[in-house]
Image: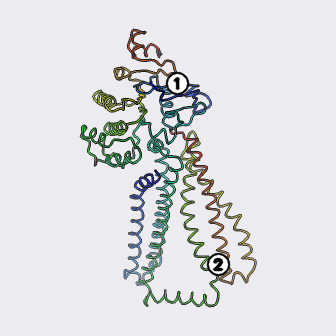
Amino acid sequence: MLGKLLKQEWRSLWKVETLILGILMALTLLAGATFALPIWKSEWVGIQISMMMVVLLYYAALIGASLGCVLYLGIRFYKSMYTDEGYLTHTLPVTSHQLLLSKILVMAAWNLISTLAILASMFVFGLMVASAFETGDITQAFREIYQALRRMWGMGELQGIGTFAVGMVLLILTDCISGPMLLIGAITIGQLLRNHRILGSIGAYFGLNTVLQIILTIVMVPSMVKLMLDEENLNSFSSVIGFYNVMYFSMCVIYIAVSVGLYFLSEFLVRKKLELE
Amino acid sequence: MSELVKIKGLTKSYDKRKNALDHLDLTIPSGRIIGLLGPNGSGKTTLIKLLAGLLMPNEGEILICGKEPGAETKAVVSYLPERTYFRSSMRVKELIEYFQDFYADFRPERARELLGNLKIDENASLKTLSKGTKEKVQLIMVMSREARLYLLDEPIAGVDPAARDYILRTIISNYNEDATVILSTHLISDIEQILDEVIFIKAGRILLQDSVENIREQQGKSVDAYFREVFVC
């Protein structure tokens, strides 16, 4: 049944999510293309502000797309579980574990897709801007960066970079799961209220986020203080990398622990406390 | 007739002031069409939602085919709520596929035949259909299952008399004869002719459970007239 639930869940989300990311890509190309216009080479006094405006508008599009994707995932979860559509969802012959897992996996997949799309958009935008202003060969810049990194590697300056990359990937992956899990947990907790359930869900979301931030701060502060206190550490690239490695892996563990906790809480609430109006 | 549903001491309250269902005991046999009758707020919808697994009881026990409401009972219970509950962006053919995916007892050919009788296009999106047509599509989907228990909450409320006839015909001619249909309504005169049995419910308690034949014989009046007498304001 999990496979069938995944199929139906994907069908209910893909159109709007693809539309949002499609619009982002179109805006990226549009914003990037404006930098190819000859007007930027003019001497007009407002040119700097205009340029800044285009960049700001592009950032607004990035934030809008990112929020839009997450918001739509939350709205779809709420509608399919706790509004009229819930009458169908909760009368399917499936367990609460199957139901929640299908939603989490598809939401996590879309979170990952939107993260990759945003990274791709930033890369394309950066590339378009750079190629508009760079008179020389753009590939030359990449070659120089690569050679600088190789030099640092040879001097032992990049110690821990592999772990850093793995930590980064793991962090993105755990964030893709913990994000939807926070949404699911908050919306499900909000349903415990008799009235004002949407407000309750929003309140629970901010509450859960605050708790998560407090936990992250408590865990991060000691290693941050240790790094800051020793000036030698701050000047060493590998020490900074080492700090980030500790930070990323700690964050991953916290995200996983919070997600697992919220999953079992949500499953219990769906199984034992369901109250469809 | 075997026992299909067994309810013992079932209590459900939405707040501390009043119980929607109050220590209710009930046994429902298989192979019957049962009218769940009562005034507004008597607990009909609450009882149906508890049977469908959409609400959790505060106290008591529900057994459907010997099992508590859950994934196994949902596989044999076909539920029609009193509202439109399908995602409006779906097409009718997607709904058929959806039911076929999840319910082993769903008969797509029967659904297609019933939709064809009403000339409802399978490619139509639900959002383009009128409220009445959507309700008919819902009924067709629910009655195209060969379930053990059909729970129909107010299936004829708010529809015109011609549509009522269609709905009742669909119920009678499509339900599995070994199954039981529980039908809640307060439009008793419209459904009386199809009922085998009635349950009168008031303030969360069962007032009466008897066959329509007995009521007519013993009270010398129709179920509708007897209902008006029992629930006189």
- In the image, A50 versus A13, the foreground residue is A13
Q: Amino acid at mark 1?
A: Leu
The residue tagged with tag 2: helix, strand or loop? helix
Give x and y (percent) for residue A189: 59, 47
Q: Residues within 10 Å of mark 2 (few under 14, many from 20)?
A: some
Name the element at disc 1.
Answer: strand
What colour scheme does the image use?
rainbow
Say the numbered circle drawn on residue B58: none
Identity, as a three-letter code, of the amino acid under mark 2 = Ile
* Circle 1 chain: B
What residue do we see at 29% from left, 47% from top? B124
Q: Depth-wise, is mark 2 or mark 1 nearer the camera?
A: 1
- Asked if the residue at tag 1 contacts the one at tag 2, i.e. Cβ–Cβ closer than 8 Å, the answer is no
Mark 1 burial class by Cα count in 10 Å: few <14, some 14-19, many 20+ = some
In this orientation, which residue lies closer to the viewer: B10 or A198?
Answer: B10
- Residue A239 in percent (x, y) is at 68, 80
Q: CA distance from mark 2 to mark 1?
A: 68 Å
Give the residue at mark 1.
B26
Above/below status of A53 relative to B71? below
Q: Name the image quarter holding residue B17.
A: top right
Q: Label 2 belongs to which residue? A: A241
Question: Which chain is mark 2 on?
Answer: A
Q: Is residue B160 above or below residue B223?
A: below
User: Looking at the picture, do discs 2 and 1 lie on one chain?
Assistant: no
Residue B77 relative to residue B67: left or right: left
Q: Position of residue A1 (x, y in %)?
A: 46, 50
